[in-house]
Amino acid sequence: MAAKKSIRSEGGDIRRVAVVGGGLAGLMTTIKLCEAGVPVDLFSLVPVRRSHSVCAQGGINASVNTKGEGDSPRVHLEETAYGGDFLANQPPVKGMADAAPGIVHLLDRMGVPFNRTPEGLLDFRRFGGTLFHRTAFAGATTGQQLLYALDEQVRRYETVDLVDDVGTTLAGERMVRKFEHWDFVSLVIDDHGACVGMVAQDLKTMQIQAFPFDAVCLATGGPGVIFGRSTNSVICTGFAAGQAWKQGAVYANGEFIQVHPTAIPGADKLRLISESARGEGGRIWVPKDPKDQRAPARIPDKDRDYFLERMYPGYGNLVPRDIASRAIFQVCFHEKRGIFNDKTRRNENEVYLDLTHKSEAFLREKLAGILEIYEKFAGVDPYHNPMKVFPAVHYSMGGLWVDYERNDQGGLRTGSPRNHSTSIPGLYAVGEVDYQYHGANRLGANSLLSCIYGGMETGPAMASYRQALSRSAFDLPDSLFDKAAKREEKDFQRILDQNQGDSDGENVYQLHQELAEVMLRDCTIERDNTKLDKVIEKIGEVEERLGKVRVDDTAPRANQNAQFVRHFESMVPLARLIATGARNRDESRGAHYKPDFPKRNDAEWMRTTLARYQGVGKAPEFLRAFDYQLPGQTVHVTDAVDVSLVPPRERKYETAGAASAASAPPADQADKPDAKEPAHG
């Protein structure tokens, strides 16, 4: 049957697609879909402007080379691949690095108030893993400024009427319909295994509704809440990814969890102190004498150990995050040289992040946003006192597996329906919820870039997929969607009713705290197989106790207690996936570090971890290859990593220039991919 380009289905319905998540990735995907003439329903758990992207502080990478340092997209590609310990497929990284300068200039034209030099040029700061000033920034609230700019673009499409195939304006039918305070519940899968819609719940009325869509994109962020206290928002449970995984999507590289070196320790959550603080000259140190009880301002330079500068003189305080976090962990946990605390009268697991050698005027111009956060929550003036920080769970390099199609230049073929497609046809994923761009460790300021670039590729890919469909989801029987809605209504009622007669029923928040404690302690910076076995055993115990959970709130409206139970029931299997992947990978690579296996093992482990859900209480099935379907084609996928653009080598940050100098090809070969394209996953 011929491809359907019509805006209407055969039955006359408007053929819409869904984007779930109102952060940078979801908004850019929505914009590109609208530019392609595809109507979008945008779902967001919170008001779009409160999406987790608003919390990003430091900046967005782009090799504009304003300062004439010799930076280029080629070097950006090399340093991203190198910083990710060669576990990222390189064509998507190349596409991202090549597009980055244009993306930053686009955002500038949208009105993002980037910092500028005295000459009026865009200003750029250094971030970890690079020797170049590559990070554009808007003070220390870059994520907020980018989110607001893209939100304004999407709001414009909320006012644009649809025009049908014969040019008739459809009054009241907008290009974008926004559903804020709606929670994604599950996918609607047809008899052929394709995603043809989704079920969602209105969090005010608790109404559950199934929607047909020709394609669905998840842009729902990471799973930081699995670890309890993290720098992530409390909405970052990983539920949507976990639910898609339980419904058949392949998950990739789940074991790679980034721990950010600098956050404010807190009882409720950990508040990020951006890498931009070190990018603007911040220095990390502890007293040389662990018994030194003096206030930091009274400790002279000769009595301070600037240990990152000592251990990694080439990059100093701007080594990649995995290296900095392990160094801080080594100093505090193993060497017992944390900071003395007057109240507890012992050394705590904290180090100093010191900006006091910079002028207050400079700091207010460049870093006011994050320093205000520290002053508010720590009660200490960071302009004149060093900040106390410690590593915190921050980002997931792993996520839903997504595909790509490589072009002749080694980047991505824009518009291919394979780009950002999951293993479930019709389901796409973009942003932190996917695994695509960062390998074993994300370089700072690549996250905002990957979200926006990923959205720029996902929108056209979904449009191509929709165009190639032989039948619209809107022409499928209503019974398919009614059945999906009734299934989820029944499951939600189960959560409300279960164990109500049992006064000893489990409290889901206490159960989450127990799981989070072991995940945070034994499945983050350092990993030991014996401890990981106990983590997996604890996860099994939590799974058993889940059936005994009783909600305290059975109200029919705005029921957050029951909603969290539903989320937690998908968080637990994801925790098992993360811990089991870490247990299996006997090497150290990027954020995954095992002291018993301190070296990277390329012969055995330079491959993507591909996992498929097997059911409650069961270990994931780890795959070496699989097939999935797109309209008119079967795609074969393996776990091999495409490293054809930047040859793998050992990571070393002790000397300057380690990332790029060793691998830069002759200028005439810089953008030529190998003749033979490896399989990828």
Image: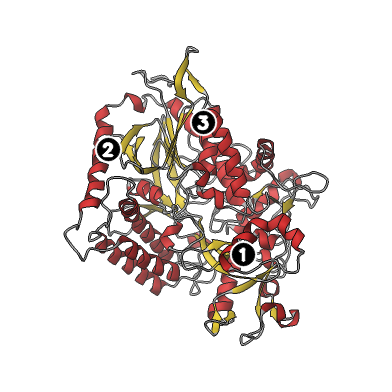
Secondary structure under the numbered disc 1 in the rendered image:
helix
| Residue type marked 2 | Ala
Label 2 vs label 1: CA separation?
47 Å
Residue 536 position within the rendered picture, expressed as x and y whole percent measured from the top left: 34, 66
* Residue 545 seen by the camera: yes
Residue 267 higher or lower than 566, as above or below: below
Check disc 3: other Cα within 10 Å, few if <14, some if 14-19, many if 20+.
Answer: many
Label 3 with label 2: CB-CB less than 8 Å: no
Return the residue found at the far left: 501
Residue at the image point whose x is 59% and y is 48% from the top: 143
Mark 1 surroundings within 10 Å by alpha-carbon count, few (fewer than 14), some (14 through 19), many (20 or more): some
Mark toward the start of the polypeptide (2 vs 1): 1
Q: Is residue 437 visible?
A: no
Residue sitting nearer the eye, 333 or 557? 557
On the image, numbered disc 2 is attached to which residue? 485
Image coordinates of residue 213 in percent, x first then y, are 38, 31
Q: Secondary structure at mark 3?
A: helix
Write down the residue under mark 3: 33
